[in-house]
Image: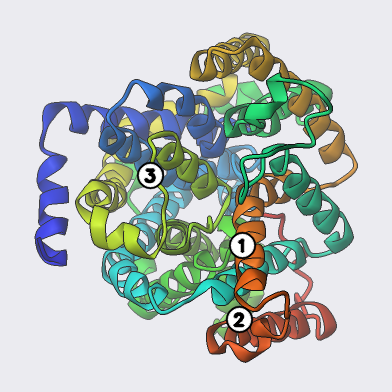
Amino acid sequence: MDVLGSMLHGFAMLAQPEVLLYMVGGFLIGTFFGAVPGLTSLLAIALLLPLTYSLDVTVALVACASIFMAGMCSGSITATTINIPGAPSSMMTAIEGYPMQQRGEGAKALGHAALGSMIGGSIGALLLMVVAPVAAEFALLIRTPGKFALIAFALIVIIISQRGSITKGMIATLFGVMIATIGIDVMQPVARFTFGSATLVQGIDIMPLVIGAFAISELLVQADSRGKHTVDLDQVKATKVRRRDFIPPLSEVREIGLFRYLKSAAIGYAVGTLPGAGGSMAAFVSYAEAMRSSKHPERYGKGNPEGIAAAECANNSMCGGAFVPMLTFGIPGDPTTAIVLGVLVINGLQPGPEFIANQLDLVAPMFAALFVSALILIPLTLYLLGPYFLKIVSIRRDFLYSSIAVVALVGSYVATYSTFQMGLSLVFGVLAYFMRKQKYPTVCLLLGFVLGPSLEEYCRRAMSISDGNPAIFFTSPDSLFFLVLTAVFFYFMVIRKPKDRGLGTPPAG
């Protein structure tokens, strides 16, 4: 079946009642998690991960895609209403959305955010459908030395993207690689680093690491920071809006301009294809470019819909871009796609150059769900449920977080039926909590764990091919290309640091 036929098959799959139910349900779950401060779509998918053992892989991927898109968009809800971004990617939206809320234009700000998300998300999904098969064909040209250089490039970019904490990013990444070495050797049937424990021979499963680093640690962080973000519930309850208030005026949309939407979507998609960049980086770069090229830059920071459109268009377009390196090279584009990679691995699937060519029918419904979620579900849910979204912040945190803790621990046990692995979830959760307290990026820990085995395997294979001569990495054209690309990124992101024009440093995606 050709690419077009596979994509049409993917859209047809969404018409099946079960698949449609999981897509809509996933979107609503992602909207809730993205709108509640402290909860993210990343946490939602992490909690969904244990359920994928009992779900059809296509249904699981569709649910993940809709959660991803919904969580990216809905972070703008609390960013606008109470100036607390529901997700890191909504930080730039808060800069413009909250001043509009203070002027009584909160609903209109959310309308602009939804429109930007709809345009950016649908463009990103369309580009994913077009680019992913082409990228897969290109990936077939990369040999063993090039694969090592590519993964090394991904890890280095992930580390240097932690601007202001490169050393800590490197330490967290190396720690993740070290954890991945526990268990059976990747090249030989020999146990290593088990410290004499028969339980550790099987290695560390991705499930306890994901749930611990992103669910348990988040709950500990939220418990520790309780009271630091005070929400004016009286103000939220007193806010009365009509559904038509969420529709942005056509005059303002024209003033923003089609070119602004398209350029922001292109920026977000391009940033998404970079390993580890994430939605916050996409929103930041797009917002900075919008301010630079704006006819009225003095309006930024005072409630400018143009800034909201640029940021939201970019971070939702990033969703499509982040799937490209994950599916074609097995390198996650952001933390959420790293967990989606876990869904594939759990089901016995290994993304890579041959994956798209051989399994396009399997992932086509996920592409379609990403597109439908952006184009239809984002504006539809905002128009129908917009007034209720504004009341999400009034949910009692003690009940919410205790419930999530129970689901996380039960899920980690059900996924492996191992009390040891469930205990590891708590260990990694406490460890990640202290790492985050000291500003060590946990996303580097996860990506180091995911990419570490492949890095070691391709390095040892290449050295075996060359009889131990490391010159193979410099004589192989594909490897040399990625080494040069790594040097270029290092120069522009570390040696020649870009000026942020006073916008601050974006959080790690």
- Give the residue number, with chain letter if any, for mark 1: 277
User: Residue drawn 16% across and 40% down?
Assistant: 14
Q: Give the amino acid type for the residue marked by disc 1 in the picture.
A: Ala
Direction front: furthest residue: 467
What's the amino acid at mark 2? Phe
Q: Position of residue 330 (x, y in %)?
A: 48, 57
Q: Is residue 424 left or right of residue 144?
A: right
Whether 87 is drawn above or below 412: the answer is below
Q: Distance between the residues labelled 1 and 3?
A: 24 Å
In the image, what residue occupies the spot 76% across and 53% down?
A: 173
**435 versus 330 height, above or below:** above
Q: Quadrant of the N terminus?
A: bottom left
Q: Is mark 1 on a helix, strand or loop?
A: loop
The amino acid sitting under disc 3 is Leu
Q: Which of marks 3 and 2 is nearer the N terminus?
A: 3
Give the quarter of the image for residue 481.
bottom right
Q: Which of marks 1 and 2 is nearer the N terminus?
A: 1
User: 286 or 430, which is in the foreground?
Assistant: 430
Mark 3 lies on residue: 349
Q: Marks 1 and 2: which is nearer the front?
A: 2
Q: Residue 213: where, in percent of width, then height?
A: 70, 33
Q: What SS does tag 2 mark?
A: helix
Give how far across and how far down residue 203 sits, in percent: 66, 32
Q: Are marks 3 and 2 in contact (CB under 8 Å)?
A: no
Q: In which quadrant of the rendered view does residue 23 lie? A: top left
